[in-house]
Amino acid sequence: MARLIRTEKEVEGRFEEVWVVVEEDPLEQWPAGPLTVVGRPAPRKDAPERVRGEARFTADIRLPGMLQAAILRSPHAHARVRRIDLAPALALPGVRAALGPGEAHGLVEEAGFAGAPVAAVAAETFGQARAALAAIDVEWEELEVVLDADEAVRRGLLTAGPRRHERGDVERALAEADVVVEATYRTQTVLHNSLETHQAVCEWLGDTLHVYISTQFIWGVRQEIAETLGLPEDKVRVVCEFMGGGFGSKNNPDEYTFVAAELARRTGRPVRCALTRREENTAAGNRNATIQRLRAGARSDGTIVALEGEFTNAVGWSGWNASTEGPMRMLYACDNLRTVTYGARLNTPPMKAFRAPGFVEGTFGLECLVDELAARLDVDPLELRRRNYADSNEGTPFSSKNLAECYRLAERHWERRHEVHARSDAVWKRGVGMASQIWYGGGGPPSYAWVRVGSDGRATVITAMQDIGTGTRTAMAQIAAEELGLPLERVEVVLGDSARGPYASISAGSSTTPSMGPAVRAAAADARQQIDDIAEQRSLPAGTPVEDIVAVLEDGQILGKGARGPNPTGMSVLTFGVHVVEVAVDVETGEVRVERVAAIHDVGRIVNPLGASSQVEGGIIQGIGHTLSEERLLDPATGRILTTSLDAYRMPTIADVPEIVCEFVDVPDEHLTNLGSKGLGEPPIVPVAAAIANAIRDATGAEVRELPISREEMLRALEAARAQERGRRGAPAAV
Amino acid sequence: MELLRPSSVEEIDGGVFLHGGTEVVPLLRDRLLQAERLVDVRGLVPRGVRDGLVGAGTTLAELEREAAVPAALREACRLAASPQLRNMSSLGGNLLQQTRCWYWRLGYPCNLHGGDRCHAREGEHREHAILANEFCASAHPSDIAAALVALGARLRTSQRELAVEELYRLPDESDRRTTTLEEDELLLEVELPPVEASIYLKAMDRKRWAFPQVGVAAAQLADGSVRIALAGVAPIPWRIESVEALDAATPLPRTAWKLPVARALVRRALVALA
């Protein structure tokens, strides 16, 4: 029976109350550990078509008569369009239509950042469209520019009111603490830089808008376009079969889609609007910079008695105030806590969710602070973490938590530090650091799937979800194969089209597997039940292969349907993990090399160990870039982005990838769905920066508190450590 | 725009030279270079290595694998760019590449573009020059140029012979160019005098595919003397006599970190050659 419930929905650490109709989830969880297909490593089902270049990405869509659009962006960090003349652009060869501010959703008259979209043209070729942009005549009224986050907070320029959390009595606890550590941490702005830039192709067929888009949320895009354009939702079809990365930046349609839709409407032709790499580096979202002023108090036995944090998110012109304080609130048991989080409104490009938004930044601050506390207390960092283990989330029980087991598995990696230290020499200092991770990743309803079984014993999973590159097709096929009792190669997955399948969840917030997996299993179980009914009526012995049972159906098909059940009420569904990192630091040139990362994660049942370890590796590599080399830079005078190409914005190369050891506490969450799986997209990036910084401190004694840890920052920290050492010895400070 | 393929150097009459295209094409695309006429010089410029002569059309990938080439040049090639770029880019083109200064690359009206100030000096400049940076704080990006200067290499062009060092000049108020190349002058060959030993060391932001934050080339000549040249520290490849010469550096607030890096790499290079 359908059941209507009011439930809390969480995406990327943001909560809202929603009504959902959930179907009962009567399936018992499978036993823990590897099964026949689930829990066994499976290469990606779509690997051959990807490798052969046959997989069709949005960037590959070429429709007959398709026009190319280009977007005019503000050169000023804050300015108003006083007057705009599109006529010179329209007069150029190949140009078919042009739009000014307000003529498509997202094209603005007041540009709040350099790169804000203000106008657009469609032409026969992209070169013609780009040339036409240069012909648009704009008269700008320049407005005041604010680029400094502290200044914005002082002046009350916030995207929303400050967010505060308090429990216990922080002042008293700090006053009574045996040790108090205090430090300011800063993290930089970094960019998603997905391999496929943000883009859409729009085409009107009758009164239906067809949208091919690189997106993490087919149904969210459908809903937002329908609402913005005043269309019934079923008059918008959204397609995304393959996509080249999103990392949180592709949850919405954004200006390029609305520009393509409007230009397509005006010209009666399909229109493609694809951001260039330079636009991608300018106006496609970012992980916002943060300033974290933190304090921790502890008793001499290592009990943390007080945590206090003032967090400033440099949000940009718009965006939301991510939970940078989240790890401080949730990672450790601590009776006294006070946090305040400001979202500074600046004339810089808006933030977007970026792989564990807030928690990546907040974990850097918190887990470095905890190591600084460990050093002051002279307590082993692993031991200090164990002594402050949280058994509940501010009183709410965890649906499952195996962080203690992660710590146990980390021991053998942590023990390596003695041997690592011994390999230091006069130039290269080596050390080991660790950091824990906490993040969401429980997913939730609604999400649906269908399963179709033919009389040949082959099955197709149908659901209008997206595979954002994480291996979702393979994981969903494994789940269906397991439930149906079929080998993996006999299960196909059809996804990526809102016109071909039921509603499916967003692929953000590490939610794809925990949201969709249970729905797919339920659909497969529904089909399997029907198959078993047929076997019984045919008096076939138990264990008869599926194809032998259904062979009599000829053109008949078995159709199963399934829905994601509710999340456990009154419980916190969270993911946990710990990383142990080994680094080498060249103390003369400031070069930092990450040599080894051991990652141990607790995300419930692992569906595909091969896909899971790929996720962990990707998260670690992206985290290394965040920690060591990536930084979006602005011109301080104008607020324009300076790092607009991939030689200026430095992501790690394969040569920068260390040895990665990946381990899982592969235990299903007994309270979470028929699958017991949580998500893994975000957890592996969360602890990377802190673990590297803690390893650097272990190697050199230098306190690095600012990301990225460039050579400049590393040399500064080394010099500060040397000065402190000289001061301690009473030697003259000058050399 | 037209593409010409002259059959001899004499036929060249203006236009922008094109070889591997790894520099010229992006500059054209970003409108930093205007050209009515592209001159494909691949048929005119010698390619390959023989008897201490290196054709300016030799790719970096070929040089990196050429045993007859001194270690400093091979290593400078190996540590430059990516394999794909090294397969395309020519030695001559590499010597003539423009700075990576983001202000210059984004077309700011800076001194190097003929404007009236250096935006980097007042702005974001953490990868900029620490020497000769008064007028323009851009840093020269060529690993290969530093290696050739240290090796004492000479250039033969379509018009003259000169030391590689003499190819470069500091831009000033009256002339914003960073090379001494004349109109229609084409780099043809590099002559490498014999050296006893040589080395190239490079500090980057990541392990591969990055321009030098600091590059140090050093070569020991037959008479025992050592020549040192640096990349990434001045608007042009920069030769120094000794590590002490770096005491004269004039770093900007956020380029001061390059100085200890340069000193460490020069010392290491000298130790390695000793």
Image (spheres, coloured by chain):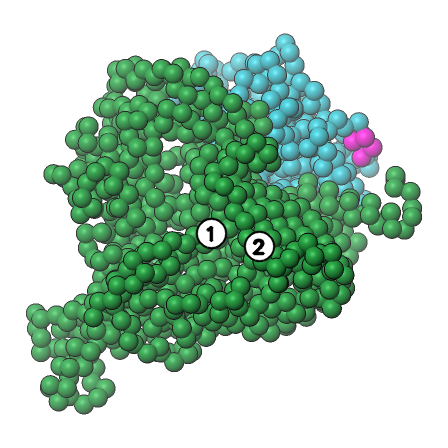
Local secondary structure at mark 2: strand
Decide if residue A276 is in sight here.
yes
The answer to whether A105 is drawn above or below residue A341 in the figure is above
Local secondary structure at mark 1: loop
Q: Would you say A225 lies left or right of A430 here?
A: left
Quarter location, residue A171? bottom right
Residue at 28%, 76% (x, y): give it: A26
In front of the other: A166 or A725 = A166
Q: Is residue B39 magenta?
A: no
Residue A310 spot, x, y in % from top left: 61, 46
The chain drawn cyan is chain what?
B
- Tag 1, which chain? A
Residue A468 spot, x, y in % from top left: 36, 53
Quarter location, residue B269? top right
Q: Would you say A613 lies left or right of A311 here?
A: left
User: Which stretch did the figure color magenta?
Assistant: B243-247
Q: Amino acid at mark 1?
A: Arg
Residue topped by disc 1: A355
Principal secondary structure, stretch drawn in magenta: helix
Residue topped by disc 2: A166
The answer to whether A130 is drawn above or below residue A57 in the figure is above
- In the figure, the shade used to draw chain A is green
As measured in the structure, the alpha-carbon distance from the residue carrying label 1 to the one carrying label 2 is 27 Å
